[in-house]
Each structure stands twice: as structure tokens, then as C-alpha cells.
Amino acid sequence: MPVVTYVEHTGAEHRVTLQSGVSLMQGAVANNVPGIDADCGGACACATCHIFVDPTWAERLGGRNDMEAAMLDFAEGVQETSRLACQIKVAEDLDGLIVRLPAAQH
Amino acid sequence: MADGSVSKSVTDHANSIPLDGIDVSNPELWRTNSHWPYFERLRREDPVHYCADSMFGPYWSITKYNDIMAIDTDHHRFSSEAHLGGIAIVDQSDDLRFPMFIAMDPPKHDEQRKAVSPAVSPTNLQLLEPLIRERAGKILDALPRGETFDWVDRVSIELTTQMLATLFDFPFEQRRKLTYWSDIASTIPGPGQIVETEEAKYAILLECLAAFTELWNERVNAPPTGDLVSMMAHNPATRNMTPEEYLGNLVLLIVGGNDTTRNTISGSIVALNENPDQYAKLRANPELIPSMVSETIRWQTPLAHMRRTALEDVEFQGKTIRKGDKVVMWYVSGNRDDEVIENPNAYIVDRERPRTHMSFGFGIHRCVGNRLAELQLKVIWEEILKRFPVIEVVGEPDRVPSPFIKGYLNLPVRIPA
């Protein structure tokens, strides 16, 4: 089962073992990782699960889908590495993934 | 029964009339707070329901959480465009238009929204919080003890109006004009209403435009400041707005930041009084305030619906929505959908996942001010709990007779001496 590290804005790290198939959002919420609000429950509809993907992983994860890009357009502090955590499904080959959380979800 | 106030005769009526006789838009249902069993029936028997005739014309009711979510996020096929009727069940009047980004589709919507959203960024909210707290404190300290007063006027309206004046950097002593213009903008003109004709409504809103044009002229050539007027005046996307668009976006921000927050502040007092065990829990555990804020926003659902217009024929849950049809997403119903929210009619200040609600909408139009609303509510309750052991509701409130704005015209309360 892949291990994902969520790094808070403060630098605090949360190493979490996740099941393949759950989204990074679900993984954060289920493991009480602070900093992900997920108001819409994973429907790509609220942009409150904003994360930054470590650049070394960005290519392996693929890019943003259209709806994700549209929603990210309205998030705060969006960067090249920004993704919505609800749109990234955990898989075995993501073991060791590191993602960073913004200071606040808009 | 939801909210504990629907009579058996109303429930019987809702359960027995033919489905095609149900019209949830009837303002009387909202004045009397008796729409609940009609929505329950629709969710159960006809969740995507066509009402062929109403005072607003024919319309579809979308009543379940997931269906509402699907339509709210499908802006390619379900438009918010003003010229198609806009975003409320009442069609925006044909010749008197207020172009506002809530009633636009991409790309124009996106450009205008991005011009104002920095005003309510997390960074800006951090700066606003001490001011909100100071003002909340002053308002609360001035309240009478041991006598009945109107919470809506003395607190809900006063606090949100002060907030708006701050956001716009509008002359503080004239801030009640913002409330006035907001109420005018939200009123469907008619006999006995605060404004009786569309012409009269527009004339008043032109006064609003004149006042804000003066502010624009003062700030457009000055260095940019953090208020909404200056932001719009300096942002390339909005710098060259027409006067109509400026007025439209002003109305949007004034209305968006006004009734909704106001009615949720009032609603929190109603909800806690109807559920004294929850009030006790909150008093004993002030760390529950953020959760209680979200739960109140869900329970109150200050905007009962948002409306879209179909841009093409759409097959949806076994029904055919035709191009041009009016589609009403009843957030008030989605927020009580027991397939998504557990025990949805209960007001529970520490429920799991309180942020799972539809009151802010979803998708690209999701309420841009939602964190500001939550901040105001959080702060006012922190300050209330510091000061008053209890705020008692001492009479029935009058409710806004509208299928859109779900709120309270007044709320008689008493703070024990």
C-alpha cells in the first residue's frame, strides 16, 4: 500500500499509508491531515482540496482535467504544481509521493 | 418534522395532492415556513419535477443533493446567463438589466470574478478579522438587557451592513444605504412591496450607481487600495466596465454579502432556541463554533435556490429537459437529503462533516464570499458567548415571503438582565 506524505504549510509532515484507489483528498480527510477542506466531497466542485505536487512527481501523475483546471482557476495562490487532491487517485506506483498543502483553502 | 413547525394539514396536503399540482415556488409556502413536506415528497417520488404553471412560468425542480451538484457543475449545458433569465426563478426583467458575473457564463464570468475574489482572499480575511471583532463587540455591548428587541435590526443587519461598508470603503455613517439598496435590488416590485414598479426600482438603483461612481472617480487614478471599488477600478478585466456592468456587480456584491449573512446570523439564534440542548453544548464547548457556523448555514440555507437555463435538450434522471427550460436547483431541499446527509432535519452543532452542504453552491459559481460569511459568523458567536449566557427568542419571527431569499424580517429576542 503506497505511502504518501502530506506536508503542511508550516513544514509539519504527515506520512500516511493509503489504499490504492482512494483519492489524495479522501486519504487526507480519512487520516485527519489538516489543511484539506473538501467541501464538495470530491466532486471537483469547490477547489478546497488544493495541493501542490512535488515537481518530481508531476509528470507521473498526469495533468489537470478540464473541470479541475476550471476550478483551480478560482483558487488562491495557484502555481504550476497545483492540483485538486480529489482528482488524483492513489496507485501502487505513487509510493513515496510528497504533496504540499497551502496555508489556507479559499 | 423539519424545523418542527409544519402542521399536519399541510403535510397531508403535500402528500395527497397530485404530483403535477405541486408548486414549491409559491411565496406563501415560504412566508409560512411550510414548504418542507412538499420537498420531501418530491425527493421521494419525483426528484426531477416539472411544474407546468406557476407565477414564474413553467420550471423544473431539482431536489436531491447529487442531482443539484451535477447540474451546478455542468455550466456548459446549464447557463447562468442574464439574458436567458438569470439565476433566480423570477426572470430578470427584459429591458432593465444588471450585468453581474453571477449571471454570466465563461469566459466573461471568469474574468470578472477574478477581479473581485482577491478582496476576500485568506490573506485579506486575516486583516479584516480584528475589525470585524471590534465592530461585533461594539454592537453587542450596545444591546439592551431585560427587554425585547429586534435581533434582525440591531445585530444581523447592523453587523453585515458594517461589513459591507468596510469592504467597499463606503462612507461609514451612510452605511444603511447599502442595506436599503440591497433590499430594493432583491425585491420583486409589486403592490405593497417596498418598491412597486420596475421603473421605480431602477431609479433607486441608479442612485446607488451615482454614489459608487463618485467613489470610483475618487479611486481610479489613486494608488490601489484593498477595497472592492479600488480593485474593480484597477483590474484590467473590470476597469472598462460599462456603468450598467458596474452597477450589476455592485448589486451582486451588496446583495451577496447582505441578506445571506444577515439571515444566517438570525437563523443561528432561531436554530439554537429550537434546539436548547445544542445551545447548551455550544456554550460548554466554544471550540464547536466553526462547526456550528457550517451547520447553521446548512440548516438555514439563506438562498433557497439558484436557477439555470438549459442550453440544449438534456436527458436527466429519466426526464427530458428541453433547451430553454428553466431549471431550479433547490439548495434548501438538497441540504435535507438523507441520502447524503445523516439525520438532515436535525440541527447538530457537532455533526460529522458539517461542511457538506450546498448553501454556497458548487462549481465555477460557488459563492466567492463564503469564507467571509463564515468568518463573520464565527466572530459574532465568539463575542456573543463571551458576553451573554443566553439570547431568548420571545416571539415568532416574520419570514421573508420569497422562494429565493430564505430569511427573517424580524426576530424578537430578549437577553436576560
Image (cartoon, coloured by chain):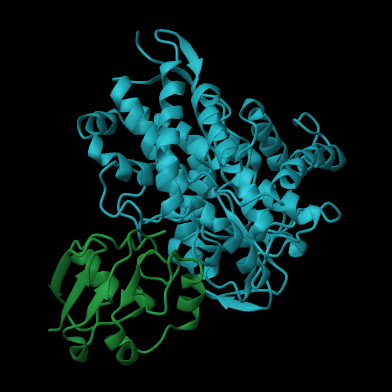
Chain colours: A green, B cyan
Q: Nearer the viewer, residue B100 or B295?
A: B100
What residue do we see at 20% from left, 30% from top? Answer: B284
Quarter of the image for residue B82 reads bottom right
Look at the image and tell me in which quarter the C terminus of chain A lies. Answer: bottom left
Quarter of the image for residue B184 reads top right
Q: Is residue B303 visible?
A: yes
* Residue B250 location (% of width, % of height): 68, 48
Q: Is B358 left or right of B306, judged from the image as shown?
A: left
Q: Nearer the viewer, residue A16 or A96?
A: A96
Q: Is B174 left or right of A82, judged from the image as shown?
A: right
* Residue A7 location (% of width, % of height): 22, 69
What residue do we see at 74% from left, 57% from top? Answer: B99
Q: Is residue B357 above or below residue B69?
A: above
Q: Is residue B23 visible?
A: no
Q: Nearer the viewer, residue A101 or B265?
A: A101
Q: Is B56 left or right of A40, judged from the image as shown?
A: right
Q: Nearer the viewer, residue A50 or B115?
A: B115
* Residue B366 location (% of width, % of height): 51, 60
Look at the image and tell me in which quarter the N terminus of chain A lies. Answer: bottom left
Q: Is residue B6 above or below residue B104?
A: above
* Residue A3 location (% of width, % of height): 14, 80
Q: Is residue A14 above or below residue B388?
A: below
